[in-house]
Image: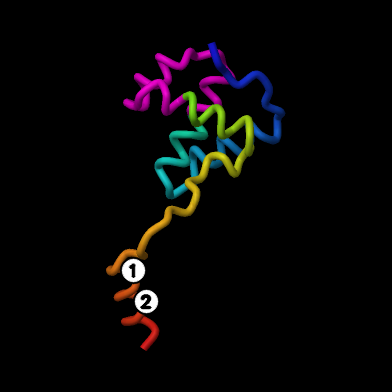
Amino acid sequence: MRCVEKLNDEEIKILKRIINCSNNYRVRNRAHAIILSYEKYNIDLISDIFKVHRATVNNWIKAWEEYGLQGLYDSPRPGRPRLVKIYLQQQYAG
């Protein structure tokens, strides 16, 4: 069973702050899942809580182990920027 083995006090404090303050629900869920894993909740239970596949939880834990806090955030995605975002930027710029 894969789980987060070590978290120091500072990491726990930051993760709890993210859970309470982040505007990004995906990051909040990932931070919460890391804490639950550290508290020895199994992956199946965590996946049930967040309504995601167990492989997704496993990926969250792997990203945490490899990248730490940065692993909670999505990487930039390839492709064309959203047209609405470009339109709004043009409206407010001019």
| Residue 62 on image: x %, y % | 56, 28
Assess disc 2: are there few (<14), some (14-19) or many (≥20) residues with their C-alpha within 10 Å of its C-alpha: few
Q: Please give the residue where the numbered disc 2 appears in the rendered image.
A: 89
Q: Is residue 87 left or right of residue 33?
A: left
Q: Is residue 87 magenta?
A: no
Among the 4 quarters of the image, the one containing residue 3: top right
**Residue at the (66%, 34%) spot, across then down:** 11
Question: What amino acid type should be assigned to the residue bearing mark 2?
Answer: Gln
Residue 85 or residue 77, whichever sits in front: 77
Disc 1 packing (10 Å; few <14; some 14–19; many ≥20) = few
Left or right side of 20 for 82 = left
Q: Report which quarter residue 79 is drawn in.
A: bottom left
Queried whether the magenta region covers residue 39, the answer comes back as: yes
Residue 60: where, in percent of width, then height?
A: 50, 31
Q: Residue at x 42, y 41 (%)?
A: 26
Number of labelled discs?
2
State the image quarter where residue 4 is shown. Answer: top right
- Residue ID for mark 1: 85
Q: Are marks 1 and 2 in contact (CB under 8 Å)?
A: yes
Q: Residue at x 44, y 34 (%)?
A: 29
State the SS at label 1. Answer: helix
Most common SS among magenta residues: helix
Residue 47 location (% of width, % of height): 39, 21
Whether 52 is drawn above or below 89: the answer is: above
- Which residues lie in the magenta part? 33-57
Q: x, y (%) of residue 28?
A: 46, 39
